[in-house]
Amino acid sequence: MLFYELGTMPSSSDMASLHHRAVSDLDIANSSLSYSNDAPEYHGSDLSALSIKEKQKSEELAARLPPPSVRRHASLAVDNSRRLNTVRNPALKRGSVTMEQIKKVDLDAEYAVYKQLGSGRFGFIKLAEHKQAKKKIAIKFFPRPQIKQSEFVREYNYSYFLSPHPNIIDTYDGMFASNDDSAFFFVQEFCPYASLREAVEAAPNGLTEETTKAIMNGVLSAIEFMHNENLVHRNLKTENVLIFDNKTYSRVKITDFGLTRKIDSTVKHLEYVTNYHAPELCEIVVNEVLTVRDSVDIWALGIIFYYCLKGRFPWQKATIMYKPYWEWEQWLKRKNPALPKRWEPFSEKALKIFKRSLNPKPKDRWSAKDMRKCIMKEKLLKPIKVNSSASCNVAGTSASSSVESHKAQTLRKKSDSPDEYVYYPETTSKDDRLEEPKPQKKRSIISQWINTTLNTMAEISEQVVSARDE
Ligand SMILES: Nc1ncnc2c1ncn2[C@@H]1O[C@H](COP(=O)(O)OP(=O)(O)OP(=O)(O)O)[C@@H](O)[C@H]1O
């Protein structure tokens, strides 16, 4: 139940606060999409999930943005000063987002629709321009009848109500359907640069420590906010992290709330396992019912963190069928005291972050807040010796000396054993392809047997998965 403090007129920043506070009051997870029709609660500047600095940032942002009530599709053409002074239309009740509010729009009359920006299981995103406002935007289309109306409405609601956070993509007010009923759509701000996936692919040896910190700071701040609002993203991956400044990567925003659900709700597992899935998700079968936990986001954040620093994934799937995962698990359980080679470039503190995010036991994983604190505070990479006489501290010099950092990162990559069964992103660097295989150390018979068995099992599992996919 929500309350409204009478006699207090919320400012635009308060509106942003109010706008996101309402998330916790939504019962979007239930299919009727019904929630309180009362006027919204006014919490002043209580941005519970944000630090003071972020709060200021959020307020600055909110001051620049029109209040959510007027960020309407139709109002894109209205000038900013007018929009900033506009207060929520009392006739438009916050709790009244229902299926009837989907408006039919003549797409061609309103927008010039350009190239496709991306696609996924729920539809596709296109770059467009609002003709009247002459403003570039992104339109997310949900083709009908493949996508259910309830799925569209749910994604819109989560996207819209999470929008005020500075590290979450801004979704404009309004749910629409094309005149010919071929698709539902909603409108988002356009990201002019790449996704994190493309940014890392362009730097196959990984990003610098400083850049990784800037990216993780934004991503973790958004997830901390979502978790505090009792929501789990459930689809965190580098493709869903959009970069808004291509120099320092300090402005990032997360997107795609199609799988977002409330913590402790139950869902059917419908997906194929990817690099980002936690081991508990790799074990369950399609259609099995599972309870939504925020710890799956923390696992995916651990994978993103590793991917940023190394330019590759630690493993293809988090099951013991994949040797790199099996080695990591053995080391965590102290069954093998030797740290697997691929983890050697990381500092003790970075390893601690991995132990508390890529931990097979969900209960032993940190919160997004703890993870962020540690990433921001600590050095993440060990100093690496470039040669016997000169040494280069990657962590300390990554920003100031990109050449040294590049050298060090190349060295880091070369330290990985080439015979390991690991998934590389499609774009392997030239250096990688030319890399000479290192001479194998003599292995004991038992370790050779384990190795062969694991590789065979991995191959069989791959074949089963691809047969199932086909
Ligand atoms: N606002 C935007 N501006 C620019 N590019 C975007 C924007 N939103 C999404 N994209 C691009 O489109 C891709 C697909 O978008 P999105 O993840 O929202 O689709 P989806 O159908 O929900 O995908 P998935 O299968 O991952 O659920 C993103 O990975 C991103 O590269």
Image (tube, helix red, strand yellow):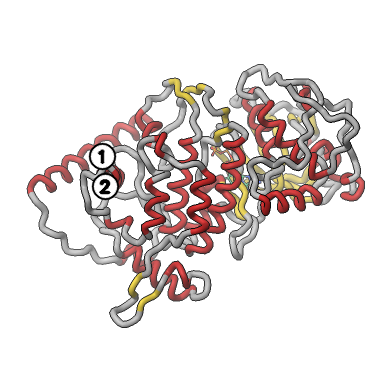
- In this view of the protein, which residue sits in the foreground, 405 or 337? 337
In the displayed image of the protein, which residue is found farthest to the bottom? 389
Quadrant where the C terminus is found in the figure: top left
Quadrant where the N terminus is found in the figure: top right
Amino acid type at image mark 2: Trp
Residue 109 shows in this picture: no
- In this view of the protein, which residue sits in the foreground, 329 or 421? 329
Residue in the image at 57% along x and 52% along y: 195
In x, y percent, where is residue 259? 55, 32
Relative to 390, residue 321 above or below: above
Residue 54's mark?
A: none
Residue 331's mark?
A: 2
Residue in the image at 75% along x and 31% along y: 176
Residue 458's mark?
A: 1
Alpha carbons under labels 1 and 2: distance apart: 20 Å
Amino acid type at image mark 1: Ala
Residue 9 shows in this picture: yes
Q: Is residue 373 left or right of residue 335?
A: right
Quadrant of ligand 1: it is top right
